[in-house]
Amino acid sequence: MKMLLIGGNGQVGHALLGRLAPLGHVVATTRSGRLPDGSPCLAADVADTEALARLVAQEAPDLVINASAYTAVDRAQEEPELAHRINAQAPGALAGACARAGIGLVHFSTDYVFDGTATRPYREDDAVAPLGVYGASKWAGEQAVRDSGAAHKIFRLCWVYGPRGGNFLLTMLRLGRERDHLRVVSDQVGAPTCAARIANGVAKAITAQPALSGTWHLSAEGETSWHGFAQAIFQGAVERGLLSQAPRLEAISTDQFPTPARRPAYSRLDTSRFQRDFGLHIGDWREGLDEVLDALAALSRGP
């Protein structure tokens, strides 16, 4: 199977490179034409929707995986047109090209399509109500993929992190080395989900049910707040020698940490459908955190 992976340098895209390789030939793209390790790949600007459609036709893959996205939640409030072009128009162009070629598309969305007022984990058919431009653009992307007529798998993700890129875990480790006191929001709840486990789940889903179309929630089990996540990060980092000591953490409310974009207060995703349809789940959020911290500790020790 030939797979065209759009966005091979993002957190999920980079993790997918290794997980998809056993399934066939992976052709990756980045905007620069270089992968994170410096090796060459195809250059593709996801803001150029016409070029994306041409790329699908030229490469003639058996499956397209769109791992690219505009993820700057706060900046999206100032750049709504760019966020919409990348998160909605680009997936629509890819899906349209896939429909014309008679091939499938894998696409990723977000818990930010919900407003966070639920009292139980969100199901796939719950009403959406994005709080900001980012969530609205991702919801529009979902709709564009569904409306295209292409076979598709849409996976909604939650609180993604990993050993590379820009994410909460790496930010906390950096700040933990620089400061002895940190204030972290404690009234937003979700399930931190590591990119490697997402990639593993996607690869297995493609293998288990290649022809199945739909939308699934793909996130870790369990829940915590950003403050609780930070506590677990620092405890694990100290145990592995990544930090000499943990900073003092102060729990604060969302109101005490204003941001341009509003965040959902509750981001838990119900993964029952994913487990039922594909016969697997990706484990508790703490297990994923241990794996990422172990990987970072191994890197810090060197060969």
Image (cartoon, rainbow, N blue to C red):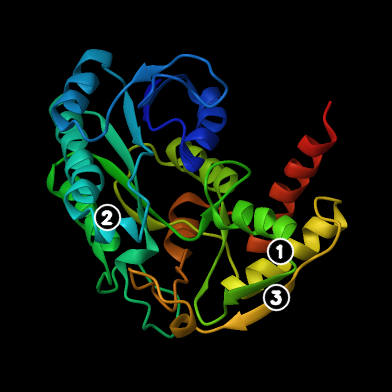
Report the residue marked by disc 1: 179
The residue beneath circle 3 is 249
Q: Pointer 2: what residue?
A: 138
- Residue 303's x, y, as percent? 84, 25
> Toward which corner of the image does residue 288 lie, by quadrant?
bottom right
Instruction: Pick the residue in front: 72 or 111.
Output: 72
Picture quadrant of residue 134: bottom left
Q: Which numbered tag is attached to residue 39?
A: none
Calculate the distance from the C-alpha at mark 1 to the C-alpha at mark 3.
11 Å
Question: Of marks 2 and 1, which one's residue comes earlier in the chain?
Answer: 2
Marks 2/1 in contact by CB < 8 Å: the verdict is: no
The residue closer to the viewer here, 98 or 141, is 141
Q: Amino acid at mark 3?
A: Leu
Tell me the mark number nearer the camera, choosing from 1 and 3. Answer: 1
> Would you say 266 lies left or right of 222 here?
left
Residue at the image point whose x is 75% and y is 63% from the top? 234
Residue 31 place in picture, x, y as percent: 35, 27
Nearer the N terminus, badge 3 or badge 2? 2
User: Is 285 positioned to the left or the right of 59 in the image?
Assistant: right
Q: Work out how far the residue at label 2 is from the one at label 1, CA to CA, in angstroms.
A: 35 Å
Foreground pick, 236 / 217:
236
**Could you tell which of marks 1 and 3 lies nearer the N-terminus?**
1
Kind of residue indicated by mark 2: Lys
Could you tell me residue 141's position as x and y percent?
22, 50
Which residue appears at 54% of the width and 52% of the height? 167
Q: Secondary structure at mark 3?
A: strand
Q: Quadrant of residue 30?
A: top left
Q: Secondary structure at mark 2?
A: helix
Q: Quadrant of the N terminus?
A: top left
